[in-house]
C-alpha cells in the first residue's frame, strides 16, 4: 500500500475561457476540453501548449476527451452531436462520428486496442463505431435518461454505462444487457471508470469499477464475469469524504490510487484497495469537474469551473513512487516497458520522475532513448552531454545502475507470457478479444471449436489472428538481456 502524505501543485493552466469539463493524459501529453468549444493539448515536458492547439472543430461545448492507448489519437465529444478523432502528430481531424438522432453527446470512450469508439448521448442512446471505417456497428437506447458516463472493461469486450437516473449497466458489444445495478447512486451517476487491470480467479475474470454521483459518494465495485453465471457486481467501498456531489473520478494506471472531484471544490485521493482517504486538495475556486492520472508520471490533473487545470505531483510525500503493475507482478521499466524499449519521451519522463528535470533538454537534444540510456558512462555524461557537476553525474549513474540491475534480474513481464501456456511467447498474435497469445496455442484453442475468448469467456467476433510485431520485437530485446 502506498502511504501518501502530500501532493503539490506544480502548474496551473489558464487558457480556457469557460468551464473545464474533462482532462486526460497520454504518456507524453495532457489534454483538456471546455465549454468554450475547444480542446487544448500540452506537452508534459514543460506544460507548453502544442503548436496546433487549441483544437477547434466542435460547434458547441466539448464535454469529454480521452486518448487512445498508444497516445497517437485523441477523441472528443460535444453538444454538437459529434465525436471527433484528432491526430496528435498534426492536430488534424482524422475521423468524425455523428451520433444517431443528432442528440448531444455527453461522453465517449475507446476500447483498449482502439478498434471501437463508443458515444453516449442525452437522449439515452449509445452508438458503437468501428474506429477505422467510421461504420456504425450498433446503436440503441440504454436508459430513459441521459447517458452521463461510460467505460470499456479491460478486455474491451464489454462496457459500463451510468445515467442520470442513478443506474449502472453492463453491456456486451451487441448491446445485450448483462447486468443492471439499480440506484447505484441516488439522484444520478456522474462518472465511472473501469480499472485497466483484470484478474483471473478460477473461471471468473474480475476487475474493479469506480463510480460517483449526485449523492456525494464515490463507490468502488468488483465486477466478475463468468461464461455460465454471467456478470455480477459487488460493492467494495463507499467513500464519503466530500460534502457535495462527486462529478468526476478515475483510477491510476496501476489501480493503486483513486481520485475524485466534487462540487465542494475539493480533489480527494484514496487508496484504491483499502478505500482509505489519503489526501484532500483544495486549491480550486469553483466546482472540480474533471480529474485524471498520468499513466507514465506521478502526475494528477484536475479541471474546474474556475476555467483552470491544475497539475499536481504525487511524489513529494510518497513512501514509494507509484509503479506499473501487470496482473500482480511488477513490470520491468517505466510504464510497463523494458528500459531497452523506451523512446526518448520515456527517458524524459523517467528523468522528471527521478527529480532530474534539469537534464531533460540535454538528453532530448542528444536523442537519448532507452538503449542509449543504458550505455551511458560518467565520461559520456561529462564529454557529450556537458554535465559538469560531479555530484549530478554520480546521481545519474546511480539511477542508471538501478535500471540495469532491475533489467538483468527481472522475471519475464506478464505481458510477454501467453495467457494459455503461461510461457514467454515466440510468435505473439492479437485475437479479437484484444489479448495477445502464442500463435500455436491460440490456433489449437480455435481448432478445438472454441469460439470464445480464453481470457473473458465471451464469444470471439472473428477467429482472425493478427501478428503482434511490436511485442515480438520487445520480447526479442528482453531475451537478449537475459
Image (spheres, rainbow, N blue to C red):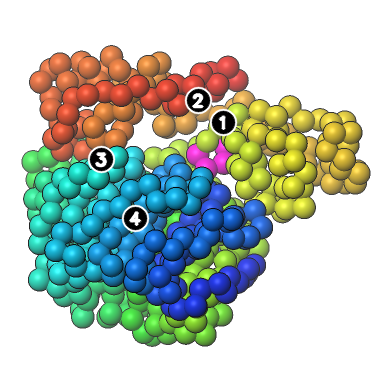
Residue 398 or residue 450, whichever sits in front: 450
For label 2, the residue is: 474
For label 1, the residue is: 341
Assess disc 4: are there few (<14), some (14-19) or many (≥20) residues with their C-alpha within 10 Å of its C-alpha: many
Residue drawn at the location 28% of the way across and 67% of the way down: 80
Residue 325, image x, y percentages: 46, 43
Which image quarter: residue 181? bottom left
Q: Which of pointers 1 and 2 lies earlier in the amino acid sequence? A: 1
Secondary element at image label 3: loop
Residue 65, image x, y percentages: 39, 60
Find the distance from the CA under tag 3 to the CA under tag 4.
Answer: 13 Å
How would you classify the magenta stretch by its main secondary structure?
A: helix
Do callouts 1 and 2 mark residues in contact (Cβ within 8 Å)? yes
Find the distance from the CA under tag 1 to the CA under tag 4.
Answer: 31 Å
Residue drawn at the location 52% of the way across and 80% of the way down: 284
Residue 193, image x, y percentages: 32, 59
For label 3, the residue is: 133
Residue 65 or residue 166, whichever sits in front: 65
Residue 184 shows up from this direction? no
Residue drawn at the location 32% of the way across and 62% of the way down: 77
Secondary element at image label 4: strand
Residue 339 in magenta?
Answer: no
For label 4, the residue is: 84
Find the distance from the CA under tag 3 to the CA under tag 2.
Answer: 29 Å
265 up-or-down from 156: above or below: below
Residue 59 or residue 25, whichever sits in front: 59
Q: Which of pointers 3 and 2 lies earlier in the amino acid sequence? A: 3
Residue drawn at the location 48% of the way across and 55% of the way down: 25
Find the distance from the CA under tag 1 to the CA under tag 3.
Answer: 31 Å
Which disc, if any, is residue 432? none
Amino acid at each position: 500500500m502506498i502511504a501518501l502524505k502530500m501532493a503539490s501543485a506544480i502548474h496551473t493552466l489558464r487558457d480556457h475561457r469557460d468551464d473545464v469539463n474533462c482532462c486526460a493524459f497520454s504518456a507524453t501529453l495532457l489534454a483538456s476540453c471546455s465549454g468554450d468549444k475547444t480542446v487544448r493539448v500540452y506537452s508534459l515536458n514543460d506544460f507548453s501548449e502544442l503548436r496546433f492547439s487549441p483544437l477547434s472543430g466542435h460547434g458547441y461545448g466539448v464535454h469529454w476527451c480521452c486518448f487512445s492507448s498508444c497516445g497517437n489519437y485523441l477523441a472528443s465529444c460535444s453538444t454538437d452531436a459529434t465525436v471527433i478523432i484528432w491526430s496528435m502528430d498534426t492536430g488534424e481531424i482524422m475521423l468524425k462520428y455523428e451520433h444517431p438522432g443528432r442528440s448531444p453527446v455527453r461522453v465517449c470512450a475507446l476500447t483498449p486496442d482502439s478498434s471501437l469508439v463508443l458515444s453516449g448521448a442525452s437522449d439515452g442512446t449509445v452508438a458503437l463505431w468501428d474506429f477505422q471505417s467510421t461504420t456504425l456497428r450498433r446503436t440503441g437506447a440504454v436508459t430513459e435518461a441521459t447517458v452521463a458516463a461510460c467505460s470499456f472493461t479491460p478486455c474491451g469486450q464489454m462496457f459500463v454505462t451510468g445515467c442520470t437516473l442513478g443506474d449502472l449497466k453492463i453491456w456486451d458489444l451487441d448491446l445485450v444487457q448483462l447486468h443492471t445495478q439499480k440506484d447505484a447512486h441516488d439522484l444520478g451517476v456522474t462518472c465511472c471508470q473501469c480499472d485497466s487491470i483484470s484478474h483471473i480467479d478460477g473461471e471468473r475474470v474480475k476487475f474493479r469499477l469506480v463510480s460517483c454521483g449526485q449523492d456525494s459518494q464515490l463507490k468502488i465495485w468488483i465486477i466478475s464475469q463468468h461464461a455460465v453465471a454471467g456478470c455480477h457486481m459487488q460493492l467494495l467501498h463507499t467513500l464519503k469524504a466530500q460534502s457535495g456531489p462527486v462529478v468526476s473520478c478515475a483510477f491510476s494506471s496501476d489501480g493503486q490510487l483513486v481520485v475524485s472531484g466534487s462540487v465542494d471544490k475539493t480533489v480527494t485521493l484514496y487508496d484504491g484497495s483499502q478505500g482509505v482517504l489519503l489526501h484532500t486538495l483544495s486549491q480550486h475556486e469553483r466546482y472540480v469537474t474533471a480529474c485524471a492520472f498520468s499513466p507514465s508520471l506521478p502526475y494528477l490533473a484536475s479541471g474546474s469551473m474556475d476555467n483552470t487545470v491544475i497539475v499536481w505531483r504525487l511524489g513529494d510525500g510518497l513512501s514509494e513512487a507509484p509503479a506499473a503493475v501487470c496482473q500482480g507482478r511488477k513490470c520491468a521499466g517505466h510504464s510497463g516497458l523494458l528500459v531497452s524499449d523506451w523512446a526518448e519521451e520515456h527517458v524524459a519522463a523517467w528523468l522528471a520522475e527521478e527529480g532530474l528535470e534539469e537534464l531533460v533538454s540535454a538528453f532530448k537534444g542528444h536523442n537519448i532513448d532507452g538503449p542509449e540510456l543504458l550505455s551511458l558512462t560518467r565520461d559520456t555524461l561529462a564529454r557529450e552531454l556537458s554535465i559538469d557537476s560531479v555530484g549530478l553525474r554520480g546521481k545519474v549513474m546511480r539511477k542508471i545502475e538501478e535500471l540495469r540491475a532491475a533489467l538483468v534480474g527481472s522475471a519475464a513481464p506478464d505481458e510477454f507470457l501467453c495467457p494459455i501456456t503461461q510461457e514467454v511467447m515466440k510468435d505473439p498474435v492479437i485475437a479479437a478479444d484484444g489479448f495477445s497469445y502464442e500463435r500455436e496455442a491460440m490456433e489449437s484453442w480455435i481448432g478445438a471449436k472454441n469460439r470464445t475468448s480464453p481470457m473473458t469467456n465471451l464469444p470471439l467476433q472473428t477467429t482472425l489472428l493478427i501478428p503482434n510485431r511490436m511485442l515480438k520485437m520487445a520480447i526479442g530485446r528482453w531475451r537478449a538481456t537475459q
